[in-house]
Image (cartoon, helix red, strand yellow):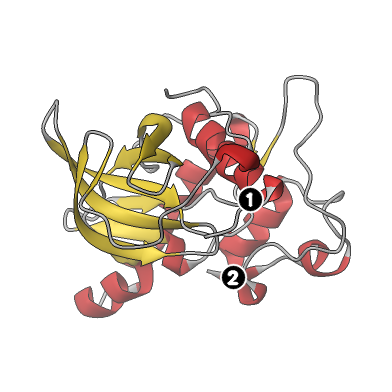
Amino acid sequence: IPGRSIRVHSRTVAVNDEPVSRIGRYRIVRLIGRGGMGVVYEAIQDNPKRTVALKVIRESSLTEELVRRFEREVEAHGRLQHPGIAQIFEAGTADAGGGPQPYFVLEYVDGKPLLDYCSVRRLAVRERLELMIQICDAVAHAHQRGVIHRDLKPGNVLVCADGTARVLDFGVARITGIDGLTSHTSAGQLIGTLAYMSPEQVLDGTDRIDERSDIYSLGVM
């Protein structure tokens, strides 16, 4: 459920990486994309009937770190309630034929990637800056709730036909806990997209990464 992490131990997870027609109460319409951690489908929810984005772990062999990252993405979305960030509806597990499979369900965003939208619409500088103001506002909301995105780039922003920008993919987000601590990435592990990463992300590991790393990435965008 929104705001609560799913708890799935890697020893109990079996993943079916074959095409599926249904996961739980969601009918799969098409594959939207594949990432380093999961597969995202467009799906139809049974009740209430609506189009959603459904993400499941896609790896045929899971690690505890992969499951923790999936849980953190659910927690990150659960903290965020902003028109510039896709809303989470549900998180849980379902058996699609290969055993219990962790998933979560997001609001479906029917939009174009940021650069494609700007190119097709031939946006002037002022119009591009107006989009960036929307994106910055969404990222500021995340920061206020203890979520550092860590992979901000044009490909993780969709723009709808009405000009509304949505920030996506909190799969490598860093989350500040109520005790002031943050979730950590393994030492020496490079997280993010190199062209948009701040110097401390590339050179200094995770301990020095804070909101300023996202701000740097916004500047590159």
Marks 2, 1: nearer the viewer: 1
Q: Is residue 1 left or right of residue 6?
A: left
Residue furthest out toward the left: 49
Q: Residue 115, labelled with which disc?
A: none
Disc 2 crowd, CA 10 A, few/some/many (<14, 14-19, 20+): some
Quadrant in which the N terminus is drawn: top left
Residue 96: x %, y % from top left: 32, 45
Task: Using the rendered view, name the quadrant where residue 76 is placed.
Answer: top right
Judge whether 37 appears above or below 175 on screen: below
Q: Is residue 93 left or right of residue 144?
A: left
For the question of whether residue 131 can be seen, the reply is no
For the question of whether residue 92 can be seen, the reply is yes
Q: Are marks 2 and 1 in contact (CB under 8 Å)?
A: no
| Image mark count | 2
Three-letter code, disc 1? Leu
Q: Residue 66, labelled with which disc?
A: 1
Q: Provide the secondary structure element on which disc 2 rests.
A: helix
Which residue in the structure is indicated by mark 2? Answer: 220
Residue 145: x %, y % from top left: 59, 29
Q: Earlier in the sequence, mark 2 or mark 1?
A: 1
Name which residue lies at 21% across and 74% down: 121
Q: Provide the secondary structure element on which disc 1 rests.
A: helix
Name which residue lies at 64% across and 55% down: 150
Residue 82: x %, y % from top left: 40, 34
Residue 70: x %, y % from top left: 56, 44
Name which residue lies at 33% across and 67% down: 113
Three-letter code, disc 2? Val
Name which residue lies at 79% across and 51% down: 209
